[in-house]
Image: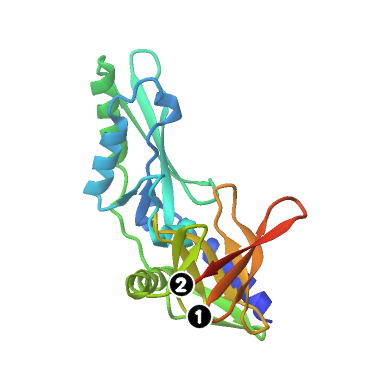
Amino acid sequence: MKTILSSLFLIALSSLQAQNVADYKYVIVPQLFKYFVKEDYQLNTGLKTALRKKEYEIVNENSIPLDVQINPCLATKANIENTSVAFKNKLKVTFTDCNNNVISTYEGSSKEKDFTKGYQEALTFAMNQVGKQNAKDLPVTKTENTTTTTVKETTNKVVTQVSKKTVENKNVYKSNGKNYTTASTNNNVFVLIDQENSQVIAQFYPAAQQNIFHVTVISQNGNYQTIGYLNENNIIIEYKTGDKSWSTTTYSK
């Protein structure tokens, strides 16, 4: 049953998606837009400025906040496309969710002949249509014994708990010359964090047997499920090394 609950927890957490850009607190803004790789026309700076005025928090792709690392669906990703036609500078600002589904699109245009001024004016017209950030706590639900209950701790509150405990946590583990620490969320769920860059590298969910956990490994090549073990002084994770091969890594106090 706990295996099912852990799976349902993950599914519920990752499937919490807002319907409008205003429902998101975080916006991931790439350093470059593929339609403006050769010349940016100050669009990156202009977009960030416009979003901050509407109280969104800007996320750099190389520095992801802890709560977004735990649940990527808390952030939307922005993109700017060049849709210009003859004698008119046009662009489209698109926001996508964690599954790359488009949630909001805004267009702007300008008759200004100078490209930088024209694209900036078009961006202003597009961003004037974007609503002010109004993100709300998103509830997480789980099912137990065919009865659905609402977990009172929302994802944002859980992340706040993680952040606070990360500061207070004195459990430092070492592996391959690097330091790691743990932070608990709720119901015996915890994360393992690389202290060097404050990134979550694994999430642990209790299994049926004591000291055995279902583990979600956070990887740049894609997250995957594995198992982990916990004793008084060690955390052990079975990492995937190939399609059908695994190896263990031990993190020791």
- Disc 2 residue type? Pro
Q: Position of residue 190 (x, y in %)?
A: 49, 73
Pinpoint residue 91: horizontal percent, then vertical percent.
Answer: 37, 28
Q: Residue at x 56, y 52 (%)?
A: 219
| Total number of numbered discs in the rendering | 2
Quarter of the picture containing the N terminus is bottom right
Query: Measured along the vertical axis of the image, is residue 101 above or below residue 120?
Result: below
When the figure is inspected, residue 184 is found, relative to residue 56, above or below; the finding is below
User: CB of mark 1 within 8 Å of CB of mark 2?
Assistant: yes
Q: Quadrant of residue 234?
A: bottom right
Q: Amino acid at mark 1?
A: Thr
Q: CA distance from mark 1 to mark 2?
A: 7 Å
Q: Residues within 10 Å of mark 1 (few under 14, many from 20)?
A: few
**Residue 139: assigned label:** 2
Residue occupied by mark 1 = 150
Disc nearer the start of the sequence (1/2): 2
